[in-house]
Image (cartoon, rainbow, N blue to C red):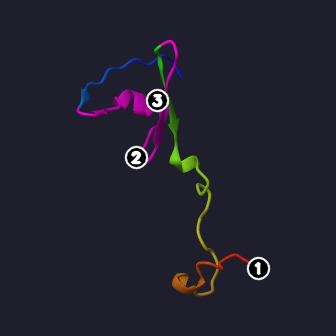
Amino acid sequence: MGDTEAESTVSGNQANIPARIRRELDIDDGDHLRWEVRDDGTLRVEVVQQRAGTFADFDGYGGTADTDAAVEHDGWGVE
């Protein structure tokens, strides 16, 4: 990853992330930005990608039995 510079304009309380930055950091819909203002006045932004979260590798129920989530939701997977 190289040094990528870009500018955006604040409109109201929002600023767009330039496309070049989104592509380089692989920022997608649903990702979060974690903001930190440091003592020296610099701003640090960390991308928290949702596809890397707790359920990123969960493919859902792969069994063959019929389920009724309205009845079984509290006990599913509990022995």
Q: Is residue 33 above or below residue 50?
A: above
The three-letter code of the residue at mark 2 reads Asp
Q: Earlier in the sequence, mark 2 or mark 1?
A: 2
Camera-nearest label, 1 or 3: 1
| Image x and y of residue 20, in percent | 38, 27
Dot 1: element? loop
- Residue that carries the numbered disc 3 in the rendered image: 24
- Residue that carries the numbered disc 1 in the rendered image: 79
Q: Earlier in the sequence, mark 3 or mark 2?
A: 3
Which residue reaches farthest top? 40
- Mark 3 packing: few (<14 Cα in 10 Å), some, or many (20+)? few
**Image quadrant assignment for residue 58:** bottom right
Q: Earlier in the sequence, mark 1 or mark 3?
A: 3
Split into 4 quadrants, where in the image is the N terminus? top right
The three-letter code of the residue at mark 3 reads Glu
The three-letter code of the residue at mark 1 reads Glu
The residue located at (58%, 54%) in the rendering is: 56
Looking at the picture, tell me which residue is in the foreground, 68 or 21. Answer: 68
Find the magenta span and give its range: 12-40
Q: Real-space Cα distance between discs 3 and 2? A: 15 Å
